[in-house]
Image (cartoon, rainbow, N blue to C red):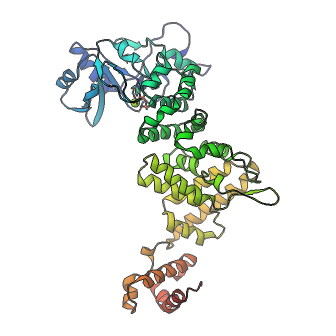
Amino acid sequence: MSPDGLPFCFQDCGEIQMEIRIPEEVRRIIGILEEHGHEAYAVGGCVRDSLLYRVPEDWDITTSAMPAQVKALFRRTVDTGIAHGTVTVMMGKKGFEVTTYRVDGDYEDSRHPKQVTYTKSLPEDLKRRDFTINAMAYNPGTGLVDPLGGEEDLRKKVIRCVGSARERFTEDALRILRAIRFSAQLGFSVEPRTREAAHELVSTLARISRERIQAEITKLLVSDNPQYFRELYEAGITAQIFPEFDVMMETGQNTPYHCYTVGEHTLAMLGVVGASPVLRWTALLHDCGKPWSCQTDASGRQHFKGHEKESAGRARRILKELKFDNDTVDQVTKLIAWHTARFEGGKYEIRKCLNQIGVQMFPLLLEVDAADAMAKNPVFQDESLRRCARARALYQEILADGDCFRLDRLAVSGGDLREAGMKPGPLMGAVLNRMLDEVMKDPSRNTKEYLLANLLRYAGAEETGRED
Ligand code: ATP
Ligand code: MG
């Protein structure tokens, strides 16, 4: 790094040969294609990320060779996107996408080009790409190929469409989300004309599959700048896919605990919770039911009793609409449903929570709780964080002591109850649950002797509906 914090290659000090470190496999693929008279370059995200000293996720190669020629040159290839000119070349266990230079034809549905036409010109191929910073190519012989000013935009930290932003977004509406997602990942701004066109065309996002929308928003959320989610609100995108958020931004919270609207609190929390998809989606949705759970008392103070249930229900629907897998939906909604638990009942309440959400989820719940506290009125933060630390310590003791909080760890099974003369059926299930509840209150009672000796009491309480 230079003294002004810029990588040396960005300093204005004349000709600097930018040395992009290309993985050996990519070097070999480019080398083999060139030996056979073709052009080949690393292209797109990997060049952008290398110039920014970020580690590229994948390395894509663009080439003048036709797909059939690529396939003939490499022993192991997979036709992953042959209709669009992409062949995946396998090197060891890794795959590298090699795509023939192409010019995209007209787009039929804001997403798919009707047909692709191959070209022999690298600049033509670069022109079909979405943003200038994604339209650079590099190989060791030629160095950087950057006819559209991508490097300059990297230096200016802007996301700018290649050519006319309106045309680019009309061709493919997903690019609107990609622009905002890249700005969050890189901490860049969206160049004004690109931003204006994006805002103008947001309604065309309706044509984009929910899976793709979900993938882009998840990338934005797990980035270093999740609070850029605000941009989706400002662009009118949340109104389409998560209208609750717009209401959250307009819902004030007149309680001593909060100093923001529900929406601003949510954005603040995104910035402090861990960067996993489950945690970030939980933070985003944890209060989404609040505007519908608000009651104002005589003094004008607002209460949001039961908002965790309302939020969990709405979150489930939103996540399902965005085609999330069941596992993620379950994890996020469980965390939301439990996010207001304060564990004042100590270990008993924690054991009950462990029974409901599972042992691996509990540390995540504490993380959500702590992040929630950090995004509220600072006056209460210390107290909340101490409460989280206490709950964590109790949780660790529960695990270390091997306390029972699940039916399959209860000292008595259905078989034991049958042997004791009880018929299988709903009563048996209810008795086992009563036993578990008692054991969660006092783990020393998790013995066959104690539980069977008290069998009649449990069964009697169950039949008379009595609370112990
Ligand atoms: P990342 O992999 O980090 O998401 P990336 O820039 O590599 O970022 P990819 O989706 O892997 O993005 O695409 C690789 C390249 O293909 C991009 O850099 C860009 O040049 C081009 N590209 C991808 N999607 C589009 C699109 N929707 N419109 C135009 N060009 C695109
Ligand atoms: Mg990529």
**Which residue lies at the image location 56% right of the left edge and 25% below the top edge?**
195
Q: Is residue 461 above or below residue 79?
A: below
Task: Name the residue rendered at 60%, 38% in the picture.
Answer: 227
Which of the pair 231/259 is nearer the observer?
231
Question: Closest to the observer: 357 or 160?
Answer: 160
Left or right, 331 with respect to 258, comes to left
Q: How many marks?
A: 0
Q: Quadrant of the N terminus?
A: top right
Task: Give the vertical position of 336 relative to 2 (above or below).
Answer: below
Vertical position of residue 271 compared to residue 327: above or below = above
Q: Do we see residue 399 in this rendering?
A: no
Q: Quadrant of the C terminus?
A: bottom right
Residue furthest toward the right? 299
Left or right of 91: which side holds 360?
right
The image shows residue 33 at horizontal and vertical percentages of: 24, 18
Residue at image coords 29%, 35%: 94
Q: Residue 283 location, x and y as percent?
A: 58, 48
In the image shown, does 96 or 433 lie closer to the viewer? 433
Quadrant of the displayed image that contains ligand 2: top left
Tell me the quarter of the picture where residue 415 sits.
bottom left
Q: Kindly tell me whether residue 164 is visible in this rendering.
A: yes
